[in-house]
Image (cartoon, helix red, strand yellow):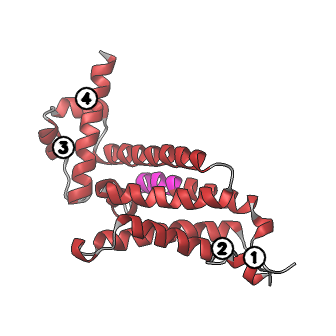
Amino acid sequence: MAKRKEAHRAKLLQIAIRLFGKQGYHATTVPRIVRESGSSTGAFYFYFRNKDDIFACALQAIGEQIAGLLNKAMARAGGDTISQMRVAVETFVLYLAEYPDEARILIVESSGLGAKLANVRRSIIASHCRSVEQALTNIAGSLPRLDPKVVASCWVGAVHESVHQWLRSPTEKRISAEALAKEISSFNLRGIGAQRGSHGNTAGDVLHGQSNGEP
């Protein structure tokens, strides 16, 4: 019984994510979610209070899925913080590119709604910012002087805005998702002085007047 209820709720949530992603928050209605899921109005309200509630649950589910993917990707990258940061950005971007409905919900549709939904969105973004801030703090000694909190916000903002613009552009004019991921990760790493150049130097090395050929 518990598994059946869980599956029923998951189906409603899956349909809601597709509709919110393709039609937008305002154009999506509870009756439409119910109809396309093959469920009933009573069943919907057994699991969710209203449209805001299922949208919040969808947003939370997306945030949790991304967090899980990032944790696994960074674990595979090993102990090098810069490599972990690069892998995290590229994994995040590739996920959003592969799942445009989830991307639109996270980046576009969750903005400018009520306080509850704004708090859910803010919590997800804050979590990403904290992860970047911690990584920057860990490697602060090898980078140009910077404010980890400010730079973390810029880092996450660059990812979100770049993906937003990519999703809005005509499909035939887009660069590949893989190229987008590498462009964003390279841009962000250059921004903190950690991008390796053709001679193996980092931007931080250049800024500090160092190179591999110097003593």
Instruction: Look at the numbered discs 2 and 3 and tell me whether their residues touch, using CB distance below 8 Å.
Output: no
| Mark in the foreground, 3 or 4 | 4
Which residue is at 54% across, 72% downward?
Answer: 186
- Mark nearer the N terminus (2 vs 3): 3
Which numbered disc covers residue 8? 4
Query: Is residue 91 toward the left or the right of residue 30 in the image?
Result: right
In the image, residue 53 above or below residue 112:
above
Q: Which residue is mark 3?
A: 33
| Near-viewer residue (176 or 104) | 176
Q: Which residue is mark 1?
A: 144
Report the quarter where the N terminus lies: top left
In 3D space, how far apart are the residues under numbered discs 2 and 4 (Cα atoms)?
A: 46 Å
Residue range corresponding to the magenta coloring: 114-124
Instruction: Look at the numbered discs 1 and 2 and tell me whether their residues touch, using CB distance below 8 Å.
Output: yes
In 3D space, how far apart are the residues under numbered discs 1 and 4 (Cα atoms)?
A: 52 Å
Estimate the x, y position of residue 113 in percent, counting from the top left: 37, 60
To which quarter of the image does residue 49 belong? top left
Estimate the x, y position of residue 87 in percent, counting from the top left: 54, 57
Amino acid at pointer 2: Ile
In the image, residue 23 above or below residue 184:
above
Residue 13 magenta: no
- Mark nearer the N terminus (3 vs 1): 3
Q: Which residue is mark 2?
A: 192
Instruction: Look at the numbered discs 3 and 4 and tell me whether their residues touch, using CB distance below 8 Å.
Output: no
Amino acid at pointer 1: Pro
| Mark in the foreground, 2 or 4 | 2
Secondary structure at badge 4 equals: helix
Estimate the x, y position of residue 70 in percent, counting from the top left: 52, 49
| Near-viewer residue (54 or 138) | 138
Instruction: Look at the numbered discs 3 and 1 and tell me whether their residues touch, using CB distance below 8 Å.
Output: no
Which residue is at 58% across, 67% downward?
Answer: 153
To which quarter of the image does residue 109 belong? bottom left
